[in-house]
Image (spheres, coloured by chain):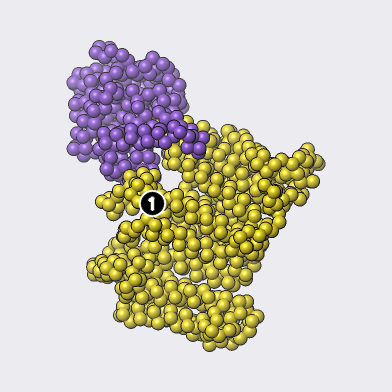
Chain colours: A yellow, B purple
Amino acid sequence: MTTKTTNATATDTTKSAATAPTPIIPMPPAAARAAAVTGSVVALVGTFLAWTWTEEFPGNLTVTGYPGGLQVLTLISGALTALFALSGYGIRGLGWLTPGGTNSPTRLLALGVLGTTGYAMGAISSELGGLVNLEPGAWVSGIGALLAVIGALGLPADQGYDRDESPNLWGRIRHSLSAPEPGRAKELPSWAEILIIAAGFGIGLYVFSYGISTEYSELFIGFLITAGFGFTAIMRAGLIKQLSTLTAKHRNVTMAAAFVAAICFPFTQSNDQYALIGANILIFATVALGLNVVVGLAGLLDLGYVAFLGVGAYAAALVSGSPQSTIGVQFPFWAAVLTGAAASLIFGVVIGAPTLRLRGDYLAIVTLGFGEIFRITMNNLNGNSGPDVTNGSNGIPNIPDLELFGFNLGLPHNVLGTELTRSGNYYLLMLLFTAIVVLVFRRSAESRIGRAWVAIREDETAATAMGINGFRLKLLAFALGAALAGLAGTVQAHVSYSITPEQYQFAGSVPPNSAFLLAAVILGGMGTISGPLIGAALLYLIPAKLQFMQEYQLLLFGFALMLLMRFRPEGLVADRRKQLEFHETGQLDVPEDKPLPEGATGVAKAGA
Amino acid sequence: MTTTTTTTTTVLDASGVTMRFGGLTAVRSVDLTVGSGEIVGLIGPNGAGKTTFFNCLTGLYIPTEGTVTYKGTVLPPKPHLVTQAGIARTFQNIRLFANMTVLENVLVGRHTRTKEGLWSALLRLPGFKKAEEESRDRAMELLEFTGLAAKADHLARNLPYGEQRKLEIARALASEPGLLLLDEPTAGMNPQETRATEELVFAIRDKGIAVLVIEHDIRFIMNLCDRVAVLVQGEKLVEGPAEVVQADERVIAAYLGTPFEGAPGKEELAEVEAAEAEAHSTTEGDAK
Ligand SMILES: Nc1ncnc2c1ncn2[C@@H]1O[C@H](COP(=O)(O)OP(=O)(O)O)[C@@H](O)[C@H]1O
Ligand SMILES: [Mg+2]
């Protein structure tokens, strides 16, 4: 492990000898590393002191000896910075932390400490009125963080420049945060690899539940800063890459681990409000994954996708037994689900059949139109401007809670000693549907049909010349996507008690709308499974937690999307195919022993 | 037109194929047959209408007039049905599925020869796995045949140019065609690669697949083709054995641009040009 680190430094010195990237702040490397370690430890120690004098600032930062609220975040990122900086010394047992870059993650983490601490100090001063409200502890942490950042910026870059021209300051900063790809991880026994995967998901679940249950927006912002820098840092360190190599090798284990982690979530939330956020994220994420069939696989830009969620929800609401339903029947849940999915599917075919002959922008505009037509029609079927089917803008309220196998989802239940709230129940029900959609996505993507979709996305003319019936397959993608959204809609109707046309807009402040769905897919990564799930979680969680910026939400959202497209156009999770760009460097050519993903799992299992 | 072919059966029979774009007649009443086991060349100056003729054969364009018959049945002008019937093609401007792997590209080519639908994929019905494996085996065979097996997992867009052309051929072969249409398969290749492609085309013929090839490299045509047809300004000028065609002075004239007997008169040329200019300005929008 230590040899790996020395290898890395060896290569980077040879590289830097050729192109000599100077640190942002020139100083001797030894001094820089010492400063980074000292600074982060000082910042860490500061969190044990009081940061302010009054409990008026949320999270109680007045206690000495017991970090709370935002201090915890500084503590965690300070500790991580120290660890990564120490790993740069080649200390035994820390080498595994940095198979890729060493100094760039240190830099990112140090910036994270400064960001969190600086934000906390700023928030305290501005909320309580002035810097006088800061106790010495805050200054200790702040100065420590600053020292750590200065030290970290003095560390040499992890790799030389690609080209020999010397870039400007911005280019140098970006370069100093980049890192080489990690080498192949040492082969571990299967059980150890599976344990690592499980640990990865455990940490993921912990971070996610922490984020959801942050009680005040200051803490959530601090969480975002810490998590953002922290995640980028471990990515630069090469840990994400190595983990994804493992998950690609044990795909079924990974799916199971993800599923188990997701099942655990409601048991970590005793507050129904947070469990509800979880349930809504799942609904949003599931619909986004359905949209990913249409956009990510088949390449059909659908700007009215939320209408299919609406069709499913309305269908389920009408047969739910709600006293306000104009039909007034009560189907058992499974029948309601089938009704919702079937209604959506039919709607999808009806809309798709005439529109899918269009390509590109034309299709986008027509689907946008149909999405709005759905909403307006639901508004107009109110007995005045049309037959009374949907109660117009009043929607269908009082949708009764489900009762499955004698288990009333509307009531809290005690399961294994923890209280499962109403939203927790629905979360678990929705999780089942998410799992179904994940399975459908995966299986259809890895089949003759999925390949035909991708071929159409890549080049429709060539695809038809290869014998693919373009129209039929596009319609199939459209209909499948619609049915999946309808499926989610049937649960959504019950979770939200009532449905109204205004829930199904093109763009609005509450996430499941067409624009946000598309954003979740693009932000997360088109054509992947985890991408839209992560994208949807972020896009739901951030506005839900930062209520105070409701008015600016769309503005900030647009801004964030622009930044993303500029710096990471492939989305947070890169498609497996995009990862294959790796081949361009020829790195994987020699040891490549997995001709096909499935084949690889089979081989690994047989070998185990 | 009056060549005596030694072949037994006719695979492709195009008769009277005409393609007009507005005022421009890109292909004018072209007849062409390809017999089984034959390699037929189609040559002509740039803009002669060769690619357009291919597009008419494969259903990408609906010919204004004329019919295309494959092994006795008239082909509907739908690309996927043409491929299903047994005609596969490559493109002059390489049109691979750039973000799919080499193997996946070939698997897509097998689309018409496999039946597994969405339900089969979702429920993983009994036949699914077997069909997938069979397809993979067939695709790998083809990659070995074209010499791309080692790169099965690479993205198509990362292949060097010559290999992209080979991959297009492999992908076309995956649809198990009876006739393969190659549109300038050696464009942009160096002499060695061109030689290798010649070998490949012979090997394809030896598999019992008839080949119709558009090419500018006259050596390539001479080595390869049993019969050559020359297209000039949308019309078939001559057809016959390669040596005969090469020696034909009308062909030389067409390529070099010197006037010859029976050449279109000045006013005719001007007329065509005017029509072309008009067609360009009016059809610019829907050209793609
Ligand atoms: N879709 C189209 N619309 C209008 N004109 C076209 C179209 N396709 C081809 N043409 C015209 O047909 C003529 C023949 O083109 P093409 O078949 O590509 O020639 P070749 O392949 O022999 O070089 C050209 O003048 C071209 O501009
Ligand atoms: Mg051409």
Residue B144, percent across and down? 26, 36
> Does residue B8 lie above or below B96 as drawn?
above
Q: Which of the 4 quarters of the picture holds residue A30?
A: bottom left
Nearest the viewer among B121 and A579 is B121
Q: Which of the 4 quarters of the picture holds residue B77?
A: top left
Left or right of residue B157: residue A508:
right
Reading the image, the residue beneath label 1 is A249
Residue A423, percent across and down? 66, 57
Which chain is home to disc 1?
A: A
**Kind of residue indicated by mark 1:** Lys
Q: What residue is shown at x 32% (from left), y 73% (from top)? A: A92
> Does residue B269 lie above or below A572 as drawn?
above
Left or right of residue A347: residue A586:
left
Residue B156, percent across and down? 34, 43
> Does residue B111 lie above or below A292 as drawn?
above
Q: What residue is shown at x 67% (from left), y 41% (from top)? A: A336
Disc count in the image? 1
* Residue sticking out furthest to the right: A384
- The quadrant of the picture occupied by the N terminus of chain A is bottom left
Would you say the beta carbon of the disc 1 residue lies within 8 angstroms of ligand 2? no
Nearest the viewer among A38 and A20 is A38
For label 1, the SS is: helix
Nearest the viewer among A147 and A66 is A66
Residue A595 in view here: yes
Q: What residue is shown at x 56% (from left), y 64% (from top)? A: A209
